[in-house]
Image: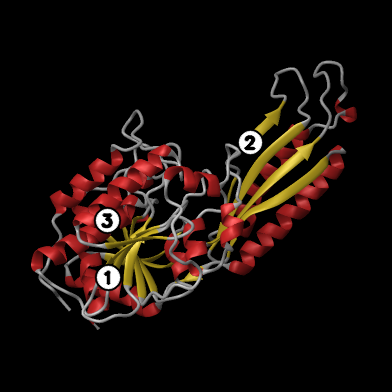
């Protein structure tokens, strides 16, 4: 189905810039941590655009926002969208492109005076990044029923406040139901956040699925002592245990090979003094793999090594899970349609998995789901220098337009 319609790229780019101005930081980046004042301001801006486009706004109890464009018939909508929260040093495209491209599809259909058979919805989900509250993809997890609303609302963030109190504070504690939503199909446009498309000179990624993710926070408790008077054999050093585990997970990725990834992203030592043995270490481990069995093996072996390292040093070890998501495969028909539409537009396309987590992987549990990737220059994301070329943004948005129109017309 070739609609001959095309999105208005300057209008889309203008909205991307306007949203990037909310929470802007030095260097061209963006900081809109979930449920902060900056996030509220970004939400207000996007909701205002939704209203200007004639969408019916609903806000649910976890703060997810859905703008509905009615179709000729009632029923479950074809949905697109993503998130607008960012990490502390984020860029302007991650998440935001998917939401604003969805609004551009609506604007394009409005301009053409077209009404689809099925309703069309554009959504942005709360706390996709997980930078302030864990787990990530919280809003979409609650939306489709895999996380209890009360558990999400009671989650305590990095600043000691809860999701509930922040939703109420910023005015986005809505009344729409969660956990039993009906969606006909979901398509998410997103920047790749990796280097493959640019490296291979390909414009469109037809995303096959999302790799599994396991986040764990470890706490090691030892004994502080003088760095100059305590013999090595008599130390109970929390810092060295953290370091040994960090090195182990890196070596483990080399041993397991394939797509196994491991990252130690946060490390806090106490008392954090040059001449004092650390009595406490708190750190996180992020393990990912498209193969669920290999990921489970990596998790098991990491736990076992951590326990042995703590025993060797005579320290106490504790851990808690922050996120645990199995790999997700997208609907084959959706993957194939992304390929076919991209090819029909004269665009190069390749199938590829996503290394990052996305709201789409949660929606895949309740409806046929697909994702469209466009290149990230230098593979950068979660970085103020994140950039995607304008022509690639336009290409991805045009593929999204045709796919949504096709899904909403059949």
Whole-angstrom CA distance, mark 2 to mark 3, is 37 Å
Mark seen at residue 267: 2
Question: Disc 2 or disc 3, which is closer to the eye?
Answer: 2
Which sits earlier in the primary sequence, circle 2 or circle 3? 3
Foreground mark, 3 or 1, reads 1
Quarter of the figure with the C terminus: bottom left
Mark 3 or mark 1, which has the lower sequence index?
A: 1
Residue at 53% x, 60% y: name it: 259
7 relative position to 249: left or right:
left
Circle 3 residues within 10 Å: few <14, some 14–19, many ≥20: few
The span from disc 2 to disc 1 (Cα, nearest Å) is: 44 Å
Q: How far apart are marks 3 and 1 (CA)?
A: 32 Å
Give the foreground label among 2 and 1: 1
| Residue drawn at the location 31% of the way across and 56% of the way down | 99
Q: Is residue 344 above or below residue 380?
A: below
Which residue has dot 1 on it?
Answer: 120
- Tag 3's secondary structure? loop
SS assignment at label 1: strand
Q: In the rendering, at what x and y percent does residue 181 appear?
A: 44, 72
Q: In this view of the protein, which residue sits in the foreground, 97 or 344? A: 97
Quadrant of image for the N terminus: bottom left
- Label count reads 3
Specify whether residue 327 is in view: yes
Q: Which of marks 2 and 1 is nearer the N terminus?
A: 1
Residue carrying label 3: 201
Q: Position of residue 21 (x, y in %)?
A: 28, 37
């Amino acid at each position: 189905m070739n609609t001959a319609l095309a999105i208005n790229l300057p209008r889309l780019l203008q909205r991307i810039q306007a949203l990037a101005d909310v929470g802007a930081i030095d260097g061209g980046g963006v900081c809109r941590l979930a449920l902060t004042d900056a996030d509220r301001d970004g939400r207000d801006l996007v909701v205002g655009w939704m209203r200007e486009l004639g969408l019916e706004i609903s806000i649910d109890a976890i703060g997810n926002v859905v703008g509905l464009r009615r179709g000729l018939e009632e029923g479950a909508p074809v949905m697109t969208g993503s998130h607008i929260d960012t990490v502390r040093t984020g860029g302007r495209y991650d998440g935001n492109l998917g939401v604003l491209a969805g609004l551009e599809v609506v604007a394009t259909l409005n301009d053409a005076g077209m009404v689809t058979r099925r309703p069309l919805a554009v959504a942005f989900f709360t706390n996709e990044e997980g930078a302030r509250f864990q787990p990530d993809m919280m809003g979409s997890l609650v939306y489709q029923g895999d996380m209890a609303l009360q558990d999400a609302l009671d989650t305590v963030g990095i600043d000691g406040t809860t999701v509930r109190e922040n939703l109420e504070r910023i005015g986005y504690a809505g009344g729409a139901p969660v956990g039993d939503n009906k969606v006909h199909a979901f398509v998410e446009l997103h920047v790749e956040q990796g280097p493959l498309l640019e490296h291979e000179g390909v414009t469109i990624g037809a995303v096959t699925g999302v790799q599994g993710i396991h986040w764990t926070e470890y706490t090691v408790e030892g004994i502080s002592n003088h760095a100059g008077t305590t013999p090595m054999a008599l130390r109970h050093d929390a810092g060295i245990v953290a370091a040994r585990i960090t090195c182990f997970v890196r070596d483990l990725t080399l041993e397991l090979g394939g797509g196994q990834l491991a990252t130690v992203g946060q490390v806090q030592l106490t008392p954090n003094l040059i001449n004092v043995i650390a009595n406490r270490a708190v750190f996180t481990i992020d393990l990912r793999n498209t193969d669920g069995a290999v990921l489970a093996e990596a998790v098991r072996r990491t736990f076992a090594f951590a326990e042995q390292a703590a025993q060797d040093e005579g320290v106490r070890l504790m851990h808690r899970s922050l996120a645990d998501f199995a790999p997700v495969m997208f609907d084959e028909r959706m993957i194939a349609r992304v390929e076919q539409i991209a090819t029909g537009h004269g665009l190069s396309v390749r199938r590829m998995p996503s290394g990052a987590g996305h709201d789409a992987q949660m929606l895949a549990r309740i409806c046929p789901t697909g994702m469209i990737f466009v290149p990230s220059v230098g593979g950068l994301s979660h970085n103020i220098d994140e950039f995607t070329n304008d022509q690639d943004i336009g290409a991805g948005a045009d593929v999204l337009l045709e796919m949504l129109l096709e899904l909403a017309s059949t």
